[in-house]
Amino acid sequence: MRQLKLDIKTENIIQKYWQHSHDIPKKVKKYIENHCHNFVLEDMDTPSFYCSSCLHKLNESKICEQCHKKYNLKNKANIYKVNMSNLKKQELNCTYLVFDTPDNEVILYVIDASVTYDNPLSNKPIRNISFKIESAYHILKDKCQNLYTKKVYLYKDIEKKIIEEKYIFCDDIDIYLDENTYNKYLYPDNLNDLKNTIYCYTFLWQAKKYLKNKHICLSNLVYIPLYYPEFEYLIKYKLYSLAFDNPHLIKYDKETKKILNPKSEYLEFIIKNNLDYWHFEALKLCQIKNINLINFMTETVEIFEYLLKIPKIKILELYNYLKTNNYDIIEYYDYIRFSKLLGYDLKNKRVLYPSNLKESHQKIIEQKDIVYDPKYDEKIKKLAKILEKNKYEDDKFLIYPAPSVKELINEGKNQNNCLRFYVEDYSNNKTQIYFMRKKAALKKSFVTIEIKNKKLIQARLKDNEIPNNDIINILNNWTSKLK
């Protein structure tokens, strides 16, 4: 935000903008009055809905038997929560965004409408509505200016702030352009007047039907359409939710171009289901035209992105596993993440899809807490120094004690075994773990050895294979001399 000198265009506009409620055109007021008549009042104390015109309770079919109006409760934008028992003391406040185009310049008004009721408990309650112009913005190609406060907002400054603070458009124009859509609506009847203005390439008027009765915010009408060229492209393809929902986040990578293509098999699906940005990202990720799957993925797209990088996880298989068992995706994500961290075999479907996720999740959390508790690592390092006296070396092989928790985990990963379970026992010297290496490849795992009470308990190659007799003989000879 900047305080700049008014330009000539703005100085001329100042003489023509609406300053008081009586300046608001009658057709705009009439539209707002009618729009407010179509609200549904939802009582916060009871699960009941009421007609906003006569205050009669709606029947089970959501029809007002007094006004004979049927209400659509699927459109959440038309539902207003109130306390019906104290309605007389309440104001129903809504905000309307109204364009005006004097001399093909663009002014956007923010008009507050306040509805009150006299005698709300009577058979014929009196409904009052008042108007107030909250603010007015002169919209230019690269900036907008509040005609009341004279503050100027450069779009490039807004973008910079959004990037710096990772905002996805926030509330109040003094904090980069209003993103609070609660009870904000657009007056749609004059959108065609924008065709001969700086909005001529936005094609905003094509979204008239989409925007009607929809919560909207200033950034959707000012900053987004004028600053991002992606907006025009998305509007032309009737991808309205994508156009108004953070088009700046849509990166035209290979997958995006594949989906947003006139010949794409996905385009009709996107339009039909009115996908917004996060639904679109889910579709890019799964590339399956299944709206139930996409809805399931939408809240946690970044988690699914992580999971699908694991080669053996297939999206439909995962979806069915989670839905069938009513498992939580966050819990599953934690389980997979820690399984990978602890060296579990993520190519094994019994590991990927445990029969009891909650139980497996709890076990792996406990393992993780042990493995990454520094006291265990400290104890293992101290024990390894003591066990160095049992080190073995000949022309071909080297045997030495596992030196740390990290080395235990790496050995388990390399050998595809369950060595991670031995951290606690090894740290307490209840069992001892040694590594056997070929001297020609000291960094490569060869044989993992468990010793208990100076006896060889087990020795395993990768995938729990048993070593040949030559190796076993070396190990038996070595263990006979342990101290």
Image (cartoon, helix red, strand yellow):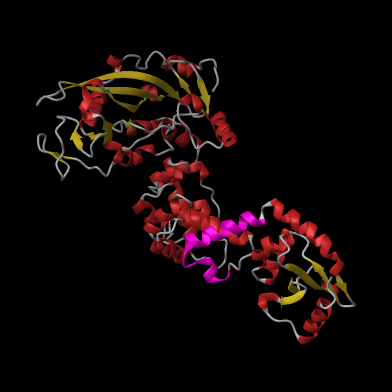
On the question of residue 257 being in view, the answer is no
Residue 89 location, quadrant: top left
Q: Nearer the viewer, residue 364 or 329?
A: 364
Q: Residue furthest right?
A: 395
Q: Nearer the viewer, residue 214 or 419?
A: 419
On the question of residue 259 being in view, the answer is yes
Residue 124 location, quadrant: top left
Q: Point out the image quarter for the N terminus.
A: top right
Q: Nearer the viewer, residue 273 or 469?
A: 469
Q: Is residue 339 left or right of residue 58?
A: right
Q: Nearer the viewer, residue 200 or 98?
A: 98
Q: Position of residue 236 (x, y in %)?
A: 40, 46
Q: Position of residue 367 (x, y in %)?
A: 61, 59
Q: Is residue 306 left or right of residue 184?
A: right
Which residues fall within the magenta stretch?
Answer: 347-371
Picture layout, residue 67 above or below residue 477: above
Q: Position of residue 6 (x, y in %)?
A: 51, 15
